[in-house]
Image (tube, helix red, strand yellow):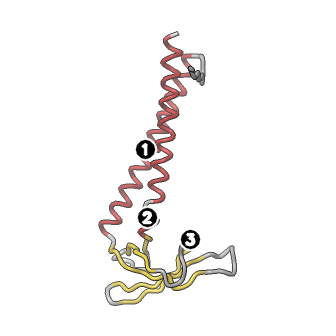
Amino acid sequence: MRIRYIFSSNPRNARIMVRITGIILGLLLVVSLILWGLIFHRSQTWSPVSAEVSAFSTADSADVWTEFTFTYEGSIYNVRQRGHSYWMYPGLELLIYCNPQNPQQFQIADTMYALPRTAAMASGIWAVLTVLMLLNYLRVRNR
């Protein structure tokens, strides 16, 4: 069984489509690499700290927050972060990365790589589309 795909039967349009998808793929790869670099830098320069979920909002769905309590260099911090994950509950101990210059700025270690992984996944999907466009262009050009 042979699968045929035709994005464009005009060689000029097929070449333009390859270029556009290639440019978008390149931009997605650059964004993905930048995000991975930022997260790697943050994981190397910020301090890992154990934090406890002390409270979270339950009443108003427009104002969702989670409060974390942690000790950093002898000081106790209670920091409220916007948003709430279904797996968090009061008393949960989790690892966070704390900014040494501003201890109230932190990032949860479990969710730290979510954005770079999403960008990498989008790059992979777009790479498949780019290869299909390239194969289409080669087939149309050879006709």
In the image, what residue occupies the spot 30% across and 66% down?
44
Few, some or many C-alpha atoms within 10 Å of disc 2 (few <14, some 14-19, many ≥20)?
some
| Residue 64 position by quadrant | bottom right
Q: What amino acid type is highlighted by mark number 2? A: Met
- Front tag of 1 and 3: 3
Looking at the image, is 41 positioned above or below residue 108?
above
| Residue 57 position by quadrant | bottom right
Q: First in sequence, mark 2 or 3: give its number.
A: 3
Q: What amino acid type is highlighted by mark number 3? A: Ser
Few, some or many C-alpha atoms within 10 Å of disc 3 (few <14, some 14-19, many ≥20)?
few
* Coordinates of residue 111 in the picture (x, y in percent): 46, 65
Q: CA distance from mark 2 to mark 1?
A: 19 Å
Residue bearing the label numbered 3: 85
- In this view of the protein, which residue sits in the foreground, 131 or 36? 131
Q: What amino acid type is highlighted by mark number 1? A: Leu
Q: First in sequence, mark 1 or 3: give its number.
A: 1
Screen quadrant of the N terminus: top right
In the image, what residue occupies the spot 55% across and 84% down?
55
- In this view of the protein, which residue sits in the foreground, 26 or 7? 7
